[in-house]
Amino acid sequence: MEEVNKFAESTATIVDGEAVYEEKDPESNSLHQSLLKRNLTLSSSPLAIVGAKVSHIESLDFEINENDLFKHDWRSRSKVQVLQYIFLKWTLAFLVGLLTGLIATLINVAVENIAGYKLLAVINYIEEERYLMGFAYFAGANFLLTLVAAILCVCFAPTAAGPGIPEIKAYLNGVDTPNMFGATTLIVKIIGSVGAVSAGLDLGKEGPLVHIGSCIASLLGQGGPDNYRLKWRWLRYFNNDRDRRDLITCGASSGVCAAFRAPVGGVLFALEEVATWWRSALLWRTFFGTAVVVVVLRAFMEICKSGNCGLFGKGGLIMFDVSNVSVRYHAVDIIPVALIGVLGGVLGSLYNHLLHKILRVYNLINEKGKFHKLLLALSVSIFTSVCLYGLPFLARCRPCDPSLPDSSCPTTGRAGNFKQFNCPKDYYNDLATLLLTTNDDAVRNIFSISTPREYEILSLIIFFALYCILGLVTFGIAVPSGLFLPIILMGSAYGRMLGTAMGPYTKIDQGLYAVLGAASLMAGSMRMTVSLCVIFLELTNNLLLLPITMLVLLIAKTVGDCFNPSIYEIILELKGLPFLDAHPEPWMRNITVGELADVKPAVVTLSGIEKVGRIVEILKNTTHNGFPVVDEGVVPPMGSRIGATELHGLVLRAHLVLVLKKKWFLQERRRTEEWEVREKFTSIDLAERGVKIEEVMVTEDEMEMYVDLHPLTNTTPYTVVESISVAKAMVLFRQVGLRHMLILPKYQAAGVSS
């Protein structure tokens, strides 16, 4: 909401979508507190920790603007045009899924080959006992890959850094996040993700893929980048924030599907986590988009199976198959399973708390300039390389299980469950198996089933402690990064530790304990349940895990909610991104919108036929994005006081600037005819954004002319009476997806609809 103002004689009030995001006065009481405790500005970078320039927050117009032009356009729309609109929506959903699947495959192929050849070279040096040379190659390659990703993010597209999910969540909630979905951001996100993940940093490509899918959706919806947009007339149907919002929701769900090969999980993720408004028609389109993604991924997996994609093969796309193990559990197993859930909630909330503190420290570092951002990213890269390469030397060599085939233990390639590392023949290094590999393969190794004695407790403790540290220090550097995989790595470690400690006292496989641990920490940190449950079932390909996975997720989320918000809510707060929560705060039920309006400045209104000079003055002296339009001298309704004004509707700031830009002025004060408006404006013109009043030149003579605002005014804005509680108004504001809400006095009822 931008502002709550009361306008004097007519006592109508406007609630506008921007200015409530103001800095909180520490001396103000709860009445004066802003609805959203956020800053008036937000960083143009998605990272709270990247000190970038700030820009004023703008909201999105999800409401249908029912002015005269819209009504004429709607009445004149033929059945063919309606079918074109429906066909275009499904076509764009198909293209979003297709392109997201193609780019996800490209990223996976690139990561598997770059990281794979790097690891093969390092292993060759280790086999030759040239350990220092191996470390130099390993650390040097990681350093260069991190440098490429960081330079791209810092110098070309700061909005490409981080996961991008909090910004998408804010956008779908109604906040315009600047430059988040541009072509430059998309390109940097793709290249940066390849570099950062290949560099062995403790991050995943899941968050970036969600952002990539959303960027693709946004660019398709607007016809391409800002400078090279297609002028195809069909795309005029998507010249509104409402349809772009739905398309970006399809992109986000396609991104999750591309990351996990989980079509149903992708749809549920969009529903549970990122989308504020949902309906059945959108459900069908998101599901269609994720189905296209799965088909594309499966097709490329078949192509790459025969070695056509280098080192990328069947295992390149993240999927941790544990379907070959029989899931047997008894009543006594409920205790350790519940314990995993409690641990996940406690550790997840602790992780959120510590990450919050570290991001604040990173903010201080990165505010010093681009060099410090690069230095921080490269320092984390060097620290990560030292730990991943050096810690396996602390682990003792373990003998291979004689029951295993000779080809599986020990392994000397880039992947495998029993890496030989520096051990003699028939021995393997369990810590190197987890550390000296890609993050995806590390998860596959720790999820491995029917390998009860593969890892020592000490190695699991070292692995868990290391990835807790790396997860905290890596997230926040200026590279594209995701939170899913680091949390999965941490959670699977303590889950496997508990399974190892249980020994013969449980029938559940240790690999399944690792799966449950990963699920619990995800729920404890991200506070998702339904979508996570389905994603893990699609990841592991084992439906028998459903009951205990549900139990773990519910316990972990409940415990985590007792301590702090979810990680995405914390990041939203750090970024200064406003967000309308689903549940109003308790104090809102004790205050009416009329009382809230009394503490705000008087509302700024415009006459139905207004002077050009006054419009220019108002636009230059206010930041409001909507103005009530009133007509004076109308016959008042029965029982109301004489001299009442009639509220004609609401006119947007963008439309006022458009009128001034096109110089649609009148020499005298009069109402215009409908044909005059259609001759000057089109629905495409009204969809334009970005023109500022400072860019419009108006002469002194034109200042004395008039503008008829009636044709451009939304005559059916959402209104509430001044006696409604703030809580009730906020629920309506959020559920309908409003940017402006008018508050009216308590006149008599005109009728009842039921």
Image: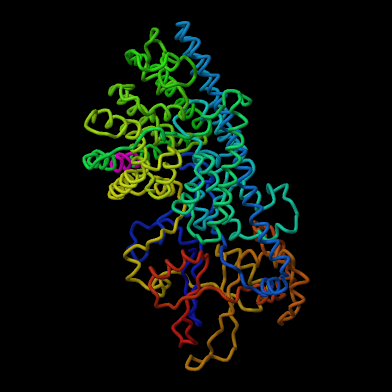
Horizontal side, residue 728 vs residue 308: left or right: left
Q: Is residue 309 magenta?
A: no
The quarter of the displayed image where residue 439 is located = top left
Residue 268 x, y percent position in the rendering: 46, 51
**What residue is rendered at 32% in x and 71% in y?**
590
**Residue appearing at x 42%, y 41% in the figure:** 536
> Majority secondary structure of the magenta segment?
helix
Q: Find residue 540 and report its horizontal and vertical position in percent.
A: 43, 37
Q: Nearer the viewer, residue 245 or 286?
A: 286
Left or right for 362, reference 30: right
Toward which corner of the image does residue 490 lie, by quadrant? Answer: top left
Question: In the picture provided, is 555 more to the left or to the right than 239?
Answer: left
Residue stretch in magenta: 344-352
Color theme of the render: rainbow
Q: Is residue 39 above or below residue 428?
A: below
Vertical arrangement, residue 473 with respect to residue 657, above or below: above
